[in-house]
Amino acid sequence: MTFPTAAKPPGRSGQVPDRPPTADATSPASEAPPEPPATTGPSSRTPQVPPPAPPPLPTTPPSWPSPEFRPATPDTPPRAADPALAPPRPADPPLPPPPPADPPSDRPAPRIERPAYSPRPRGYVGSRPPTYDAEPVALPAADPDDLDDLVADTVLDGARYGACTLRAVSLRGDSARYRGEPRRDSLLTARFGTGEQALLLVAMATGARATPGAHRAAAEACHWIGRAVGRSHARLVADIRDGRRGDLKSGLHRLTDRSLGKLRASASEQGVDPEEYAAGLRCLLLSADPECRTRVFFGVGPGGLFRLRDGEWQDIEPQVAEIKGEPVMGFGSPPSETPEGDRFTMDLGIPTPPSPYEPAPEPPREPFRFRTSIARPGDTLLLCSGGLADPLRGEPELGDYLAERWSRPDPPGLAAFLADSQVRVKGYADDRTAAAVWEA
């Protein structure tokens, strides 16, 4: 770095050289930077003036000039003290814009809006993955003369009426996919009527395990209950809107018994044991009226009825102990005492031979289940078969995952609902059928 020097007084010619003479460009000395110009003393009549002693160097480093200061380089001559005598230099390039200043520490950082779907879809929950493959492996065997008997691996449906949004799915379990067995679960979604007088029905049935016609029995059970509800939908809509719980329970009990009775009659026509050609049936009734938030559940057989409220699952499945009243048309638990008042205290498991004058008694069936639920805005009602109800009750991580996925304000689309419903859990490989209702 060179420091500016004092200006030279004019000589005999009256001009001050711009720079000291340099060596020839071809000599090695020309590659060295130019030496600072030597100052001259007072004017003299002699042609050559001896250079005076150099000025003393400052004892303290000079402070930096303004931002326009640029240190001298070999290609730039040193600046003279007098601006009028300094040669013109090219304009300085523009300075880059200063970086943006950091926000003050007392100002909160801007909030980053995150998507509503914070968790990513998962393939399974639990400590270990399930044994079976995640995707279907084998197709069920087909009969060329009875192709209507084929059942699709997955059924997906949805709708929006009134204040509720419906998503429904039925998919084959991992065990059936691996063995090439048909899906035993059946799903039916139907609308009867128009406008605010419309009634939505969701029916799901599960055929008996390890029976060849289980999928046919489940499909017939859904069709029979669909016909019975469709023919009585006007009366059912009025009872739901007016809150006549007693009439609803007795009427739906008769319709359920009649439908399952036709299923047993179909088994007799086919020459099949009625216990093998049987199905559990679970249904949900929804009114299309936006002002009506009464949701009605009824059915027979295992499964689950859950409600997601304020991010927490509630198991609202009606238990057998909660079912009151006499058995209707063959449903209900056997009596605990004889008509004479004798109580049964022990069951030794010894079968009683049937009387030759009376038909053999039928084995006890599952009791009829019924519940009405008043929905609140933001609730999610979930009706499912045992294939999803069992892991929900047995694996808390699955319930936490679905609660986080389904607690957002907007209901998921069909593809997202399918991905959530098929999250697998080790040890649970049955068919899954589920219907969820989001309340606006």
Image: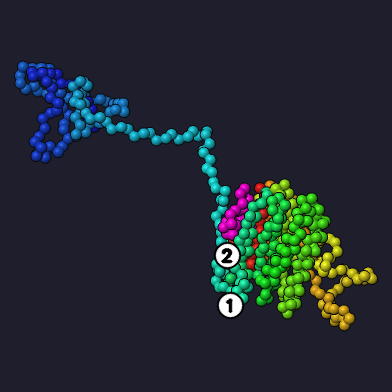
| Quadrant (top left/top right/bottom left/bottom right) for the N terminus | top left
- Disc 2 on helix, strand or loop? loop
Q: Kindly identify the residue that appears in the image at 20 percent across and 26 percent down.
A: 88
Q: Kindly identify the residue that appears in the image at 58 percent across and 77 percent down.
A: 144
Q: Which mark is residue 144?
A: 1
Q: Is residue 176 visible?
A: no
Q: Relative to residue 5, is residue 120 depicted above or below?
A: below
Q: Which mark is residue 128?
A: 2
Magenta residues (range): 398-420
Task: Please identify the quarter of the rendering in which residue 335 is found.
Answer: bottom right
Q: Position of residue 205 (x, y in %)?
A: 69, 66
| Horizontal side of residue 238 vs 18, given as left or right | right
Residue extending furthest left?
A: 46
Q: Kindly identify the residue that appears in the image at 76 percent across and 56 percent down.
A: 234
Q: 406 or 106: nearer the eye?
A: 406
Q: Relative to residue 180, is residue 434 depicted above or below?
A: above
Q: Residues within 10 Å of mark 1 (few under 14, many from 20)?
A: few
What amino acid is found at the position of numbered circle 2 in the picture?
Answer: Arg
Q: Relative to residue 141, is residue 4 depicted above or below?
A: above
Q: Position of residue 63 (x, y in %)?
A: 31, 26
Q: Position of residue 261 (x, y in %)?
A: 77, 70
**Magenta segment includes 222:** no
Residue extending furthest right?
A: 340
